[in-house]
Image (tube, rainbow, N blue to C red):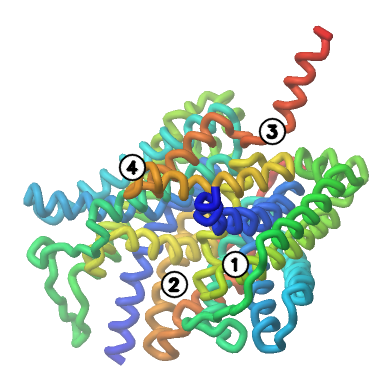
Amino acid sequence: MADFWAAYQSTLGFAMVNAFFALSTYAVLSAGMLSFATVTFAALGGFLGAQLAVHLALPPVLVMPVSALSGALLAYVVALLFLRLDSHWMALASLALVLITRVVALNATALTGGVNGLSVPLSLPLWVLAAILAVICVVFWRLSASWYGIAARAVREDAAVAATLGIPQRRIQTIAFIISGAVGGLGGILLALMLQFLSPETYFIDIAFTMIAAVVLGGSYHWAGAIVGAVVFTALPVLLQAVVPDFEKVANGICLLLIMIFLPRGLIDPRALRLRRARKAPSR
Amino acid sequence: MSLFVEQLINGCALGSLYALFAIGFGLVFATLGILNAAHGTYASWAAIAALAAVQRLGLPFPLAVLVGVAAGGALGVAVDQIAFQPLRRRGAGMLGALITSIAAWIVLDNLAGVATGQDSLSFPTDSYPGGMLHVGGIAFSTMQLITIIAMLAATLGMHLLVRHSRFGAAMRAVGWKEQAAAIVGVDPRRVVLATAFLAGAASGLAGVLGGISTANVSYSLGEGLMLKGFAAVVVGGYDDVRGAALAGVALGILEVMSAQYVSTSLRDGITYALLLGFLLLRPRGLFGGTSFVRA
């Protein structure tokens, strides 16, 4: 058991960090927007937080709120610019933002260390990570039942109907972006603390695709789906490596394909649960 | 002056590759509503197929290009039928197809790495027209001329097909609303297959020509095209072939010129700064009009 724990400790850590990214993506997705901008929020939170922790020797507890706040601020600016675009264009624009993020990270050497990267000689106990994730989960749980959560669901299902109900679409989507930015920025610094090293490649396309795949895999209609998806998507390559050592990435892709084809609404699907309950009800 | 003109030609040739990529990517996005992350791998595989045609079968250059283009198109159709068709039947929307395209990208990218032995291969120098042409003191390679002509032909052909043919009208109809298109007698399945093939073939053409002129046949060929071709799609607009082509060429020229006259390290920065500027000032692309959808 101790061996098992030692071997999979880092997998568990990365699964939890990916859960933050997935929740950040879920936050915008739950208001009907596909955006990869989480990567940019994470990059800002990560690099800024790492600089504060290294140069000002601030303890991680203080750095994290700063990272989350900076992500939220950037998200507000991004929302102002992006909410003018319609859905297809926003997806493209946010992907472009990810590409720009890497170029900025390469050239803003004062903040990011440029090509040499930035070492972050701090670590975070796993239980702290778990505790923060638990707090964020409670926030998402309460949000999902709040006026905001219901309004966001309405906007996602049908923006026109939501507008006739007096739901301010712009404001709901701006709030969604700010939540996404805060969680993304927090995820960024947590990733920095996990990796203990940051480079311009750290926050790039791979994270963008990983997190969107995690959310959709886990189920994009419930916040818990993001967490389940992140765990599955982080653990799958590790497990597959033990089974098919040379082709674990290919096998990973095939698994992803199969899950999407057979469970297109993801592993956690509130509608399927409701349907099952409704089917049982009359027999009682 | 002759240096400037030569660099202009270099930029056009490079940009033609981006343009070819962008045309196919935009076509799939506009017609099928799929943000296809696997589009770049078609280029890698087309180059690998063309190289195999040269090395194993000893085919001459024009036939090898044809093999590559056909391979790109076939791969486009195969990925569409395996990864996108099951979701289309269930109406899973843009998100599901994005995920399966990521899955296809992971699989094809890694298999391409295996196929080339994680190496960067190149075409034998006698397998393509490698000579230099001199026109009035300006030198450029035959491959550059071929690349630019191929791009112009593909753009013109695709534009005529999409905007001025019955089939193109059917494609745009399916892109707007598949059910409505089916009601007025369009067979969506044929349109889907043709679109997937054309897009894959365009990407394949970019892959073969790019693989020859950059002497790089590997998985990274498609990735490089993807990152820049994607920028061309955003600048040019995905729903217009001309816009994507023009933007691709412009980005190629900009890249070469900024490396020559500004700084090599800022080359990508300038490209993406332009991209950001376009997103903010002209978010619907060069020729982007207004779209009419239900409020």
Q: Tag 1, which chain?
A: A
Look at the image and tell me whether residue A70 can be seen: no
Q: From mark 3 to mark 4, how far is it between C-alphas?
A: 32 Å
Q: Quadrant of the N terminus of chain B?
A: bottom left
Q: Mark 1 sits on what residue?
A: A194
- Indicate the quadrant where residue B257 lies: bottom left
Residue indicated by mark 2:
B250
Q: Residues within 10 Å of mark 2 (few under 14, many from 20)?
A: many
Label 3 belongs to which residue?
A: A269
> Residue A86 appears at what percent x and percent y?
69, 53
Q: Split into 4 quadrants, where in the image is the C terminus of chain B? A: top right
A71 to A156, vertically: above or below: below
Label 4 sits on what residue type?
Leu
Query: How dense is the environment of label 3, judged by Cα within 10 Å: few (below 14), some, or many (20 and up)?
Result: some
| Residue at 67% in and 88% down | A55
| Res. B250 in view | yes
Question: Disc 2 sits on a residue from what chain?
Answer: B
Give the residue displayed 62% in from the left and 61% down from the top: A94
Residues flagged by tags 4 and 2 on a common chain: yes
> Are the two marked residues, 3 and 4, in contact with CB atoms closer than 8 angstroms?
no
Q: Do tags 1 and 4 sit on the same chain?
A: no
Which residue is depicted at the point 73% across and 64% down?
A: A181
Disc on res. B170: none
Q: Residue at x 63, y 76 (%)?
A: A122
A49 left or right of A69? left
* Residue with the mark numbered 4: B75
Question: What amino acid does circle 1 point to?
Answer: Met
Secondary structure of the residue carrying numbered label 1:
helix
Q: Would residue A252 appear left or right of B175 to someone viewing this image?
A: left
- Three-letter amino acid code of the residue under disc 3: Asp
Badge 1 vs badge 2, beta-carbon distance below 8 Å: no
What is the CA distance from the residue labelled 3 to the residue labelled 1? 31 Å
